[in-house]
Image (cartoon, rainbow, N blue to C red):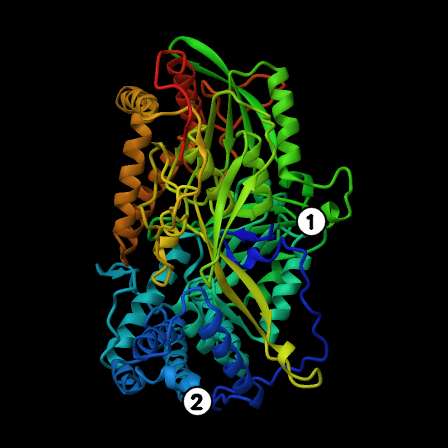
Amino acid sequence: MKKYLITLIPVVLLGWQRGPVQERVGVTAPAAASMDEDIKPIPAQYKAEELTTRILSSYHYRKTKLNDSLSAAMFDKYLDAIDHGKLYYLATDVAEFEQYKNSFDDYLQKRELDVPFQIYNVFRKRYKERSEYIQTLLKESKPFDFTQDESMNTDREKAAWAKNTDELNDTWRKYLKSEALDLKLSGKADTAVVSTLRDRYKSRDRALGRIRTEQVFQMFMNAYAESLDPHTSYMAPTSADRFKQEMSQSLEGIGALLREEDNYIKIVEVIPGGPAFKGKQLKKEDKIVAVAQGDEGKFVDIVGWFVDDAVKLIKGPKSTVVRLQIISADALPGSAPKEYRLVREKIKLEEQRAKSEIVSINNGNKDYKIGVIDIPLFYRDFEGAQHREKEFSSTTRDVQKLITDLQAANVDGVVIDLRNNGGGSLTEAVSLTGLFINRGPVVQVKESQGEIEVQSDNDPAIAYDGPLAVMVNRFSASASEIFAAAIQDYKRGLIVGEQTYGKGTVQTLIDLNQWVPKEQDQLGQVKLTVAKFYRINGSSTQLKGVTPDLELPTAFKVNEYGEGSQPSALPWDQIPSSRYEVTSNINPKIVDQIRDKHKHRLKSDEELKTLVKTLDDFKQARENKVVSLQESKRKAERDEAEKKRAAMKQLGEDNVDGDDEEETDSKVAEAPKDVKKKKDIYLTETGRILADLIVISKEPSLAGTKKK
């Protein structure tokens, strides 16, 4: 069996793998060009362009030809990478660039880089003009009138390029005014507001001044790579080195991986076992806008910083305090940043491991003991397994022990909680499935050349054959989806929650220097999509993910934050089904009866009714991207946003804050009396759904097994 490692986030995809990544030594980065100088390609990049093009055009799963259609997609992605918010280029610049729109494929084939660098150098010129305007505007002690009734659309996705400098100046005036108003409403004096903005934009100037040729080249090559699919990428030598360092250093600090995007430092992944994970304070896509040291330190604004510099500020000695100001990923426009306090520490690997608890669920005037097994990721110590260590770390081994303990406690049913589980070891996804089925196929893997491999559980032993539910949400991905899909296809248990992420692809890492002499310049690495995963029924998990049998209320739209939100995502498709035996645990009649009971509770249970209304209100509020630039109206908007956030938090949907620990009818049966569990409506309702399954399964139904 081949060993694949699959996860939601590309940065983490190779992070858990113990495969070799060659050490790089003696890499000398080209000096940064001053703002008055053009950035130019270096000789090594022409070779890297040639090798990357050959690899992606020949071995990527998609087999996309270099043509004008691909060139147009590259062109759009390249401009978007440089000026995502359409805040620098003028419409006349873009019109001038249009002549190259169908030539990007030719540049790849002919090893040309002049035009991509020329396009970027125009951006540097426009950036300098913007910087001069910003500093001129901020020279005034009170540059903004917050009594004037005007507004701004915060969504620049569909904005048009500015026709002239005056139009761009007005856009930037509003942009700066909005930032200033945020600072003012956070309690800063007028002088402090202007001072903060001056420092913020000077930091951006310094950051852009440090851009080197390899970063421009990387943007251009990724315009190609990401046109093929969102998980394929080119990493320049410095980025590849940083990638390795992030992986090796990810076991200390706050336990979060970061990236730069749109002048913000965004959270890519919250690592299980770290302070951020345990505190439930941070989540993927949150933006860090300021950092302070200790409980009394002054906040340093990091908007516009490079991720390297931000990491230096956020990291620190074990047991020290760092405070972060965060704009939540799902914050409403104009919302104030939230402050969170974290104590830096080494990530405790045991916190990544599966854990269990027993909750008491009241349903139909009867209490049920439900065992809940929380699996943060699919982990496996490949090295320990290879050396046949007796107690090597394994998701399946840990869950098997937890199941034994839960059965000894006479639980009525088991819930496997895979919410926010971004993936991990495929080996573990397959073997974990085997704990709940007799034997048979679990997943199909289709290589780029068309070969299909079926990975199966060959152990006839079953660790648990009782009532089972699997909880998933939008951030359950890859290995999580494979496990949930197999449980659903075997009709072994109920899948409850939200439609999952939809990442059904696997990548491999290729070092370009294996094709050149060792003494030559470093060329970087390519992360390449080489295979797709399919359910045993033949349906791909790519794009569509897993649709729950019972869908719970959600704060997200179907294509929000999932694979479907990526324009270049590989499509969903089907291959022939494997042969497998469906159990008699679940059938359409049972699911229909349980769904009816769930729908009844949605209409009759006050807590669920409030949850649905609150989520609907929140989704509707997020649709409005226009914010007022008048202080009184903006404050009212903030107050309203805070009310909606508070309502979400009280209902347990917002698990960012860890300070709302309320009891529900989901109680920890064996917890100390002085320990309160954080409210979790979703777990409570999943417990009720499982209780319904327990009751309904005792009634006459479609029984027996059949082969597929």
Front residue of 41 and 35: 41
Amino acid type of the residue that numbered disc 1 sits on in the rendered structure:
Phe
Measure the C-alpha gap from mark 1 to mark 2.
Answer: 43 Å
Q: How many marks?
A: 2
Could you tell me which residue is drawn at 61 percent across and 75 percent down?
A: 237
Mark 2 residue element: helix
Circle 1/circle 2 CB separation < 8 Å: no
Give coordinates of residue 116: x percent, y percent. 41, 84
Residue receiving disc 1: 382
Residue 40, above or below 138: below
Residue 607, above or below 213: above
- Whether residue 79 is visible: yes
Give coordinates of residue 635: x percent, y percent. 32, 49
Amino acid type of the residue that numbered disc 2 sits on in the rendered structure:
Lys
- Whether residue 122 is visible: no
Mark before the other along the chain sequence, 1 or 2: 2
Mark 1 residue element: helix
Front residue of 317 and 139: 317
Give coordinates of residue 680: x percent, y percent. 45, 29
Q: Residues within 10 Å of mark 2 (few under 14, many from 20)?
A: few
Could you tell me which residue is drawn at 47 percent across and 65 percent down?
A: 232
Residue receiving disc 2: 110
Where the C terminus falls, by quadrant? top left
Give coordinates of residue 125: x percent, y percent. 40, 86
Residue 445, above or below 601: below
Could you tell me which residue is drawn at 26 percent across and 75 percent down?
A: 161
Front residue of 203 and 616: 616
Q: Residues within 10 Å of mark 1 (few under 14, many from 20)?
A: some
Outermost residue to the top:
365
Quarter location, residue 536:
top left
Front residue of 52 and 80: 52
